[in-house]
Image: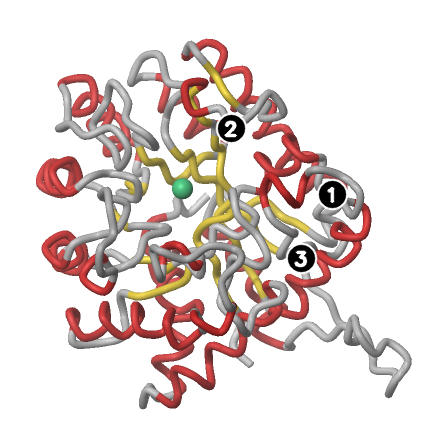
Amino acid sequence: MPFIIDAHQDLAYNALTFGRDYLLSASEIRQLEKDTPTPQRTGHSLLGWADYQRAQIAVIFGTLFLAPRRYQAGSWESQVFSEPAEARKLYEKQLTYYRRLSDEHPDKFRLIYNQADLRQVLEPWEKNPAVLPSANSPETEPQETVTHPVGIVLLMEGAEGIQAPEEMEEWWDLGVRIAGPVWAGTRFCGGTIEPGDFYREGYALLEVMGSRGYTLDISHMNEASALQALDRYNGPVFASHANARALLKDVEGERHLTDTVIRRLIERDGVMGVIPFNRFLRPSWSNSDDRQLVTLHTLAAHIDHICQLAGDARHAGLGTDFDGGFGWPAVPYEINTIADLQKLSSILSEYGYPDDDIRDILSGNWRRHLERTLPET
Ligand SMILES: [Zn+2]
């Protein structure tokens, strides 16, 4: 069972908004939230540390994510901002959340800042898979428990807290290694909710990011801003979480990548993480629909589409965005928690992908990217 690298998870946002404790398992989180409004607001949790172990999740890209106040979903949503100064304070809180997770529970989570950290996190996963007794039948066949720390690479999603482009230098020093300038639409560039091009300040931001070695995440850009960014940015690029627009009939908006953008990304040796969120796989989907309408085959079709455009399996990956604004039941039929992601292997193998390609899709492509882009120390 190959380990997995998941390029997009909003752990800090969820922990600070809903009080989710990711040291617990998804089923424990669900139990605690049973009589609360949280499942209505964001769905049932799909992950927790035990589920990472069962899923063989070795590394995640953990986001610093905030929503502009004009998109606040309700008064309960705390991670929203009106001004960059307010956003900065919230980003700092989210950064503190990840640091505490890593400092206080080094057996469970480790922040990854550089190549040495990456090697240290991956080594035990390469030697032995994690083994945890099944959540459903803990009594049967007592097995030896093997667990490994999960690595976290910090990803700033939206750059909303940035007042001046030079601040990206400080965030690099604080440990952020990946950033996207937009979520809804910012003064840097148009996004998937608010259209627009790249603006002067956006280009200045790209310049600072490139000089420090950031990976540019083009998720949440629209087609125009993504193409402009790909033209201009001289550093590494990828899309941490987006699906293929060509497969989404009648989809509105620009949240998903056109084949033109995907091809450009591939030319730059970028990787694209697909999202197992039902509305991003079948736009008309609602939680009252039959869950069998969207399966891991539907997700695999997006992976296959990227691989067909590339002519190889070196540019597709996973960016689940799990617990990021949706949860169970809004995920493919086979998924109860993130542990079920491993079922994707057999589906890709039905598509004809050999084991090496499957390993690349589950983790190898993101790994190669990290090995190419993280600083040595
Ligand atoms: Zn997002």
Crowding at dot 2, Cα within 10 Å, few <14 / some 14-19 / many 20+, comes out as few
Residue 149 circle label? 3
Q: Would residue 142 appear left or right of 29 to someone viewing this image?
A: right
- Residue located 49% across and 62% down the image: 289
The reply to whether the residue tagged 2 has its Cβ within 8 angstroms of ligand 1 is no
Of marks 2 and 3, which one's residue comes earlier in the chain?
Answer: 2
Residue 73 circle label? 2
Q: Mark 1 points at which residue?
A: 21
- Percent of width and height locating residue 163: 35, 12
- Percent of width and height locating residue 235: 22, 42
Amino acid at dot 2: Ala
- Percent of width and height locating residue 230: 14, 43
Quadrant housing the N terminus: bottom right
Disc 1/disc 3 C-alpha distance (Å): 16 Å
Residue found at the far right of this picture: 139
Crowding at dot 1, Cα within 10 Å, few <14 / some 14-19 / many 20+, comes out as some
Q: Would residue 255 appear left or right of 171 to someone viewing this image?
A: left
The relative height of residue 141 versus residue 252 in the rendered view (above or below) is below
Disc 1/disc 2 C-alpha distance (Å): 22 Å
- Residue located 55% across and 63% down the image: 122
| Front residue of this view, candidates 228 and 147 | 228
Amino acid at dot 1: Asp
Query: Judging from the image, what secondary structure is the residue with disc 2 in?
Result: loop
The relative height of residue 35 versus residue 297 in the rendered view (above or below) is above
In the image, which is nearer the foreground, mark 1 or mark 2? 2
* Residue 214 location, quadrant: top left
- Residue located 24% across and 38% down the image: 221
- Percent of width and height locating residue 29: 75, 50
* Residue 303 location, quadrant: bottom left
